[in-house]
Image (tube, rainbow, N blue to C red):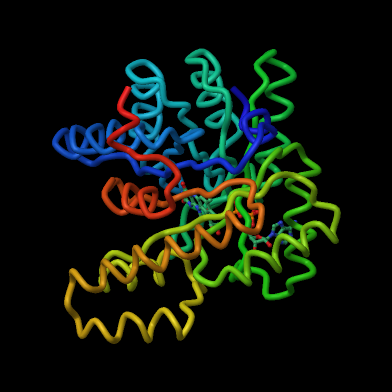
Amino acid sequence: MHIRDILSGPGPKFSFEYFPPKSPEAAESLFRTITELQRCDPAFVSVTYGAGGTTRGATHGLVLRLLQETRVNAIPHLTCVGHTEAEISSLLESYAVAGVSNILALRGDPPKSGGGAKGDFPYAADLVGFIRRFSERHGHDFGIGVAGFPEGHPGTPNRMLEIDHLKAKVDAGADYICTQMFFHNGDFYDFRDRCELAGVRVPILAGIMPVTSLAGLNRMSELAAGARFPARLLRLLARANGDDAVVRRIGVHYATTQCADLLDHEVAGIHLYTLNQSSATVEIFHSLGLRSPEAAVS
Ligand code: FAD
């Protein structure tokens, strides 16, 4: 089912993000996580893709396994940096044959070494247009999501230009936006308003990642370059004095209050970055009173 159709239904939706496991043990652990989190009844789950194709087989394998063995609506991420049209076509063909309905179309980040990043797609908008044309040619209508950056993308300091680039992705055929994680809801509301003003009128899912450790916080600041950690969050975490359990409790509580506020402000959906763990997400669901994961076992 297309995400645009899911999002057009009543009420905000939840989705979860996973990354492909690196070993058979990690795969089994991830399947336990996915099974547990299915009790929260996500609208869909998405599986990340290593830019340049580093997890090409693993992403593809996990998405197909999810489709075959579970009732999860699984969406592959697909980055175009370093890829040729032939490579992208072959992946899309395989997803179409497997019955995958949606793709999250991204550029990805070129390798820091700078080598080997050239490909047929300079930007995600080019990939979106390619997927649309592929859909028309092959009679398989992929739904397409794209990335948005409430705190701004580091590659485009000019915020007006950045929204133009986002609009280009929607004009090329994207039907929803999923945002990078953010820690200050004001950034999301401002981003949503700027999208509206620029005529970007597709549903926007808010990306939320609970801080569960100080090491994780540092990794996030590396991965989501430019991530803005508000003083309020840092002050709360400082009070934990490095106690891992307290850091985790504060991080999950902070993410829960972010989610509650987003739900109060008519968010179209919340995309939780799970880091392949279930407990923080389950706690957030409990605290929001959305659904009792234990009671919802099917
Ligand atoms: P684009 O939309 O192409 O934008 C990249 C930069 O180029 C921006 O600064 C933009 O303003 C600028 N730009 C766009 N068009 C033009 C133009 N015509 N001229 C000049 N500048 C232009 N990365 C992964 O490797 N794997 C993943 O699975 C993955 N999943 C993600 C999921 C989400 C929800 C998000 C938010 C990010 C994800 N990323 C992933 C990270 C993403 O690939 C990087 O942040 C990347 O730098 C930007 O990707 P994009 O699709 O937004 O690119």
Is residue 15 visible from the viewing direction of this image? yes
Is residue 113 visible from the viewing direction of this image? no
Q: Is 171 situated left or right of 290 in this image?
A: right
Rendering coords of residue 74 (x, y %): 46, 29
The correct choice, above or below, for 234 with respect to 57 in the image is below
| Residue shown at the point (63%, 56%) measured from the top left | 148
227 or 248: nearer the eye? 248
Quarter of the figure with the C terminus: top left
- Report the number of discs: 0
Rendering coords of residue 101 (x, y %): 57, 23
50 or 75: nearer the eye? 75
Quarter of the figure with the N terminus: top right
Q: Is 26 situated left or right of 9 in this image?
A: left
| Residue shown at the point (56%, 39%) measured from the top left | 104
The correct choice, above or below, for 97 with respect to 46 in the image is above
Corner quadrant of residue 297: top left
The correct choice, above or below, for 219 with respect to 291 in the image is below
Q: Is 182 situated left or right of 220 in this image?
A: right
Corner quadrant of residue 34: top left
Split into quadrants, the picture shows ligand 1 in the one at bottom right
